[in-house]
Amino acid sequence: MKNIPVICIHETTLAEAYEAAIRAVYENGTPFKTQYDRPEDPESMDCTINITIEEPETDPMIHMAFPGGIEELKEYVMELKGFKDHWTKNMNVESDKRWEYTYHSRLKNYGVWKELLDGKSQEAGKIKVDQIESVINKLAKQPFTRHAQMITWMPNIDNDCFDPPCLQSLWYRILEDEAGIWWLNCNIRFRSNDAWGANFMNMFGFVQFNKEVIAAGVAEKSGRTVKIGRMNWQADSFHIYGKDLKTVKERLLDRLNDMPFEERTLCFNEDYIRDMYDQAEEQILQKISNYDKIH
């Protein structure tokens, strides 16, 4: 094979899209080695993918096969909203093993990183751009703009970064319906996306980020009702690692014929699920506080 497969998925809900995407890359992807393989690992299955979710907030949203729980979804959404931005490392301290970035820090404070300057941990960088505020302002002023974009890649750091950002860009545009409601449409591009280990949490997280940060911000600035429209998810490398292939088959693919879709999914808007999700915040804040005390 000389060409990496390009797969297109088009579904109504998040859970449907996730399941279809996993099945597609497993069955129609191409084997690839990765720099993270252990000697005993089989090759990964890989493709370039384009996933369109027409109604990201419509249930069923949650697929029960994803490797995580309701609490982990809440924690990831909090991370995307900046609760862990201070966990990043000092870039010129080799012994500092904390994260090199967070997505939120790249979006909120693009161009900034931590270094030890004059013996103290300080922010470094010649530019500092709040891309989130810029996008909100652009959309509130001119909802049909094509300029409402955010990026994460910083070539001065990421070209030599051990684990550079997978998320590359977010692009927004708003359509107005006959009732005057604004619908926030979004394109999200990843250079690399772990289909089994991360993709569902990534997609769920950015649905909530778009709702709670971008749409809410535009609504506040414009005085209009803003709802979440379709989300288009693009990944240059959408892959299932070889070490996970057996688990994917057992936990998901082998159950497709015997287990109804309704039993493979959860409705996020069910009261008991939302209660679990909301109540997880206190525990997550304590986890962050405990981490801070030892770092």
Image: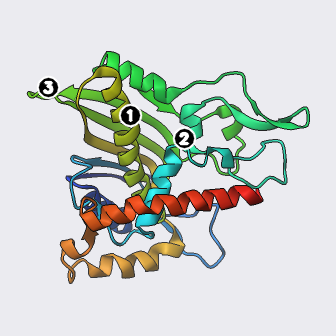
Q: Is residue 116 left or right of residue 165?
A: right
| Residue on which disc 1 sits | 214
**Looking at the image, which residue is at 44% across and 53% down?**
202
Tag 1's secondary structure?
A: helix
On screen, residue 172 above or below 51: above
The amino acid pointed to by label 2 is: His
Q: Position of residue 134 (x, y in %)?
A: 46, 22
Neighbourhood count class around disc 2 (C-alpha, 10 Å): few under 14, some 14–19, many 20 upward = many
Q: Is residue 215 left or right of residue 33?
A: left
The amino acid pointed to by label 1 is: Ile
Res 159 quadrant in image? top right
Tag 3's secondary structure?
A: loop
Neighbourhood count class around disc 1 (C-alpha, 10 Å): few under 14, some 14–19, many 20 upward = many
Q: Position of residue 205 (x, y in %)?
A: 42, 51
Sequence-wise first label, 3 or 1: 3
- Can residue 29 be seen here? The reply is no
Mark carried by residue 180: 3
Tell me the CA gap for discs 2 and 3: 31 Å
| Residue on which disc 2 sits | 104
